[in-house]
Image (cartoon, rainbow, N blue to C red):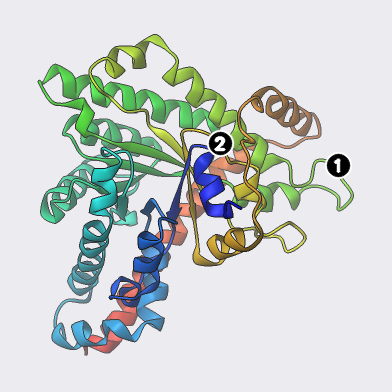
Amino acid sequence: MTDPLSALQATGQSVWLDAIRRSWLAPGGYLRRLVEAGDLNGLTSNPTIFEGALRSDPSYDAQIAELAGSDPREAFWAIVKDDVRAACDLFLPHHRATDGRDGFVSIEVDPRKAFDTEETVSEGLLLFRELDRPNLMVKVPGTEPGLAAIRRLLAEGVNVNVTLLFSVARYEQVCQAHLDGLRQLAERGGDVSQVASVASFFVSRVDAKVDALLPADHPLRGVAAIANARSAYGVFRDVVEGEAFAELAAQGARPQRPLWASTSSKDPAYRDVRYVEELAGPDTVNTMPESTLEAFRDHGVASDRLSGSVEAAHEQLAALAADGIDLAQITKELETEGVDKFVHSFDAAVDALAERLG
């Protein structure tokens, strides 16, 4: 019998882990075991993840001692870069075996620069060149100023993970930025086949916001997030089947796959793997925290739930709008809150390091 994670991969979806810590990278560590077993195709990280790792994993103690007296912000980046570089090396054989389709590891630019195009581009280029790994992805928030940064980084040949996407309208803009960036790269003589990108569409946070506005017995509770993501998947299919992408694909360009993020269930009333099961399907990625990954391994059921789902998703979103749910406003709030959360985690991690550095 096929295990659930293998069955999920068989739908055409890549399984990435939304977590990292130093001890997992050691021989026999959790991350190494997952990679060696073939359960994992990639990894994402963010300031919140590193804040938690630094507070709970003693594997950082030796490096923190070596960095004693240094600037806390620089020390934080030194630790993050070392972990991400080591993770890239761990996934590199898988990256090569999949001809560059998978095996990516993401590092996020300083979230305080999410609304500054120039600073985001500068830091994205610096990270990509300094870490110097073909399977590194630079995470750029999909804010309005982030769109120009995404386009410019792709045009420079940087692998980009567009993060903090909540609305379908913003996702459409990101798809266009991806096409424009690759087109500019090609016009400058670059090799578009060597550039990869994913668009991280956040899921469960949408239900948390929308459900709070609906009565407890409302039939559309728990519908918004999945319908929103499936609607975005419809946009993806239209893009990859369109003429603009076909011209780039003829030059070897890869599609910018949707990546489902925030896939742990926030409401205990919901099945703990619902945002994995309901969004399984071809040409996508699901990045899960450790708890969700292990829950899916234990009792997840995998089948293609995306193909053919778009029309029903549009009808569900229309029904929500008819009942007074302003999803455009809700997703705008979620974007702002998402950036704020990562800024807070970044600052909290630096502050925690400062106490230990002396």
Residue 308 vs 351, above or below: the answer is above
Position of residue 65 measured from the top left corner of the image (x, y, whole percent): 19, 88
Whichever of callouts 1 and 2 sits on the residue coming sooner in the sequence is 1
Amino acid identity at mark 2: Gly
Viewer can see residue 348: no
**Quarter location, residue 347:** bottom left
Disc 1 marks which residue? 219
Could you say which is closer to the camera, residue 13 or residue 171? 13
Name the residue rendered at 86%, 45% in the picture.
218
The residue under the point 67% across, 53% down is 208
In the image, 175: left or right of 87?
right
Q: Position of residue 304 (x, y in %)?
A: 61, 36
> Is residue 122 shown left or right of residue 13?
left
**Foreground residue among 179 and 276:** 276
Q: Nearer the viewer, residue 95 or 18?
A: 95
Quarter of the image for residue 356 reads bottom left
Q: Secondary structure at mark 1?
A: loop
State whether residue 107 is above or below residue 241. below
Number of residues whose C-alpha sits closer than 10 Å to that of mark 2, classed few (under 14), some (14–19) or many (20 or more): many
Q: Residue 83's quadrant in the figure?
A: bottom left
Q: Which mark is residue 202?
A: none
Look at label 1 and name its amino acid.
Answer: Pro
User: Does any portion of residue 337 appear in the rendered image?
Assistant: yes
Q: Circle 2 sits on which residue?
A: 281
Label 1 vs label 2: CA separation?
A: 25 Å
